[in-house]
Amino acid sequence: MEKQMFGNAQILSWLQYFSDNTQVDLEKVKILDITRKNKNLIPTVESHDAVLVFTEAGHADIFYRMWGAGLGECDVWYNNGSEPSGPMLHDKVRDMINRGINASAAMLILNPNARSTYKIGMQNANFSRGSIHYVGSEIRAVILNKMHIAADDTVCIVSGESIAVESAIIAGEGTVIAVEYNQNDRRTMEENIEQFGLNNIAIIDHVDDETMKGLPVPSLAFLVASASMEQEIECLLRLNPHMEFVIYTLDFRCAASIPEIFARYGIGETEVIQIAVSRLTGKHTFAAEPAPWLISGKA
C-alpha cells in the first residue's frame, strides 16, 4: 500500500483550520494530496471551485505553472509553517509565481472560473505544436466516448498523443500508459504533459512484456493500427485477458480485417464505425477531413 504523508487526522485538522479562518463552504471542497503518485493539480483546479491541496516542501515552480495554465486569478489561502495554526495568508496565484512551497502543509485554492465538468474534445490549438498531426477535436470526442474511461482506469494509448492527454485528465485517479515509437512525437508528448500539468502519464517506446513490467495493468487500450498491432494486442491480452480495445485506422482494408483479427484472439462485441467531418470554408464550400474507422471490442 502506498505510504501517505498526510493521514486522516492531519487532513481533519487542516479542514478545521480552514473552516475557522475562511468563508468557504467545505462541503464543496475537493481534497487533493499531490504527495501521492499520479495526482494532477492543474486539471483539478481548473474543474473545481475549491481545492484543498496537500503538498510537501519543494515544488519551486508550482505557482508559475498554474499561472502559465491560465489560473493566475485563483485565490490561494495558506499559512507559514507545516501546522494548521497561526495567521491565515491570502494571495492571487499571479502574485506568487516566484514562490515555491517551503513546508509540508495544505493550501486552499479557489478558482472563480472553474468548470464543474470536463468537456471532451479540446481544440487542437490547446496542444503543444510539434511533430504531431492531431486528430480533429470532433473525432477525438467520439473516440473518447467509445472508450468509456472511468476516473480510476488504467489506459494504454499507442500513438494517440491528444487521446492520451484527454484520457489522463478524465482518468484523474488512474494512469495512462502512452506508447511513442517516434522520438520527436515523444518530445511533443512530454511538452503536452508539462503544459497540462499531468502526473499520471507514463511514456514507453514500445509494447512488450519488459516495457510494461512494473506499470499498472491496463483495462482499456486505444491503438492506431500499424504493422505491430497484433504483437501489441497479444502482449496486452497476456497482461489482462479481459482487455477492451479501440482501434483507429484510415485504411478501409485494415478496418475490414480487424474483426477477423479480434475473433482470432477471442475479442468479441465487435463494432465498426466510420466518422466523417466536413468544415465550411471561407469560400462557402465544405472541406472534408480524413474519415477514420473505429473498431472496438472486448476480450
Image (tube, rainbow, N blue to C red):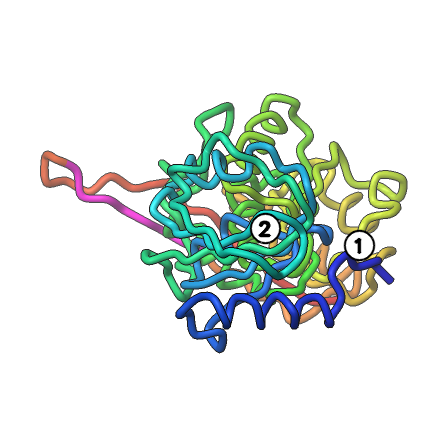
From this viewpoint, is residue 176 visible? no
Residue at x 69%, y 63% (from the top left corner): 244
Q: Could you tell whether 74 is left or right of 230 in the image?
A: left
Badge 1 or badge 2: first in the primary sequence: 2
Which secondary structure lies at badge 1?
A: loop
| Above or below, comparing residue 185 to residue 165 in the picture | above
Which quarter of the figure is the N terminus placed in? bottom right
Q: Position of residue 292 (x, y in %)?
A: 46, 47
Q: Would you name the residue on which mark 2 appears?
A: 40
Q: Is residue 41 visible?
A: yes
Whether residue 47 is situated above or below residue 291 in the rendered picture:
below
Q: Quadrant of residue 141?
A: bottom left
Which region shows up in magenta?
A: 274-281
Q: Name the residue rendered at 74%, 36% in the picture.
A: 204
Closest to the observer, 233 or 153: 153
Residue 111 located within the stretch drawn in magenta: no
The structure residue drawn at horizontal position 57% and vertical position 38%, both measured from the top left corner, is 193
- The residue furthest left is 283
